[in-house]
Image (spheres, rainbow, N blue to C red):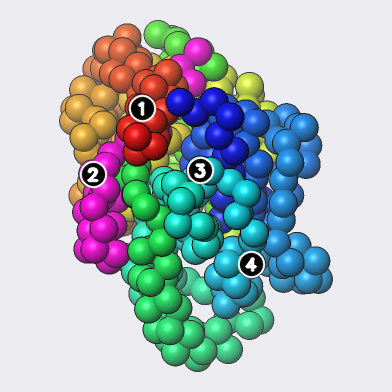
């Protein structure tokens, strides 16, 4: 049914590499002939995008803003609305921000795979307001943000009525879509490419955390906790920013940082770590599932919301507060526990990529009827 259908895939931005970009790669793998549209594109060396037709917005041509896309907050809606998608039969946005703002013809099937309603407009607005990332422009941004966001929040709600259907990445995201956008939605979990991760029953004496060094990912909590407990941890990131440099400078010798290492090297760390740490309040989180694919248990903040994907005390252990004491007490508890690494990997198999591809393809085919 999807044969001869012209498909466009829309991404908020393609710059760093995190969970949203992983899901984007999953959708591209399912629809390899699709064209890609995004606000900015800086993954030229990534083989996933080789030979793909990629259209970036006018923001790509604006000096400074094209490298600091968060400052283009008021321009990104215009960027996505400016794309001409009239030739496409199916438009799929992978969205945690403005990519769902695109405008399509009435006969075009428009689907939004939603990682979360736009965080800095809705669920995490006050957290973002308290953790500005604009450097010397922070004070100005703090002054302007309330009035700007108020207007953009209303426009975001209107734009959220444009997709014909929403797909949520977890039950929690589904509830947010209903609360903030008043839209019905179906849950299709993201996938993990199980075969790319090395299972190991032999764990070494270090913990692991992998993510982008942005405020809500809570690298600061990890550094403070491990500066106190003196246990070994490896922190992996692809984000070389002020926060990364500040935290690395204050890290004691038991904390090892790895910047921009390969996926293969990261996978080896996953397989050998005694546990993966997951301190943010997150909507889903593909990276912890990658750790589980290696048989590695996870220590996570209790308000990690995709609880339907875990088995407490068998694949995961939770800490209740985002503070040093709570995290270190849970780590001490973890070190007295025993985990079945094979069971952890078996649980991760429920999120294998073939299941995701089958479910997404089936959903789209049903909506085309």
Q: Is residue 176 magenta?
A: yes
Tell me the mark number nearer the camera, choosing from 4 and 3. Answer: 3
Residue 237: x percent and y percent?
60, 43
SS of the residue under disc 1: helix
Instruction: Decide: is 314 above or below 121.
Output: above
* Mark 2 and mark 1: Cα distance apart in space: 19 Å
Q: Which of 161 and 258 is in front in this view?
A: 161
Q: What's the mark number on residue 82? A: 4
Residue bearing mark 1: 362
Instruction: Decide: is 84 above or below 293.
Output: below
Q: Is 289 on the left or on the right of 325, as rendered? A: right
Tell me the mark number nearer the camera, choosing from 2 and 4. Answer: 4
Q: Is 183 on the left or on the right of 32, as rendered? A: left
Residue bearing mark 2: 171
Residue 148: x percent and y percent?
48, 85
First in residue order: circle 2 vs circle 3: 3
């Amino acid at each position: 049914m999807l044969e001869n259908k012209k498909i466009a895939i829309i991404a908020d931005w393609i710059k760093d590499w995190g969970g949203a970009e992983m899901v984007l790669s999953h959708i591209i793998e399912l629809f390899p002939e699709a064209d890609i549209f995004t606000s900015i594109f800086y993954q030229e060396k990534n083989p996933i995008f080789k030979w793909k037709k990629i259209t970036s917005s006018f923001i790509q041509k604006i000096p400074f803003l094209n490298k600091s896309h968060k400052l283009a907050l008021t321009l990104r809606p215009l960027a996505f609305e400016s794309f001409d998608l009239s030739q496409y039969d199916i438009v799929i946005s992978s969205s945690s921000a403005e990519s769902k703002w695109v405008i399509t013809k009435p006969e075009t099937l428009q689907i939004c795979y939603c990682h979360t309603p736009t965080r800095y407009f809705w669920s995490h607005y006050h957290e973002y307001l308290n953790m500005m990332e604009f450097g010397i422009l922070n004070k100005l941004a703090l002054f302007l943000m309330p009035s700007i966001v108020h207007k953009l929040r209303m426009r975001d709600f209107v734009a959220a009525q444009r997709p014909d259907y929403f797909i949520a990445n977890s039950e929690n995201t589904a509830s947010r879509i209903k609360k903030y956008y008043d839209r019905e939605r179906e849950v299709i979990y993201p996938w993990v490419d199980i075969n790319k991760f090395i299972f190991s029953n032999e764990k070494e004496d270090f913990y692991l955390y992998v993510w982008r060094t942005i405020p809500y990912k809570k690298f600061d909590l990890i550094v403070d906790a491990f500066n106190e407990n003196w246990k070994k941890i490896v922190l992996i990131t692809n984000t070389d920013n002020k926060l990364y440099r500040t935290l690395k400078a204050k890290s004691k010798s038991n904390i090892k940082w790895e910047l921009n290492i390969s996926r293969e090297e990261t996978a080896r760390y996953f397989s050998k770590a005694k546990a993966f740490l997951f301190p943010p309040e997150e909507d889903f989180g593909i990276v912890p599932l990658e750790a589980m694919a290696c048989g590695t248990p996870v220590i996570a903040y209790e308000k990690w919301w995709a609880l339907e994907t875990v088995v407490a005390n068998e694949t995961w252990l939770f800490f209740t507060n985002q503070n040093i004491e709570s995290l270190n007490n849970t780590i001490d508890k973890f070190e007295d526990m025993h985990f079945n690494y094979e069971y952890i990997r078996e649980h991760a198999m429920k999120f294998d990529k073939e299941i995701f591809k089958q479910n997404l393809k089936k959903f789209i085919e049903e909506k085309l009827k």
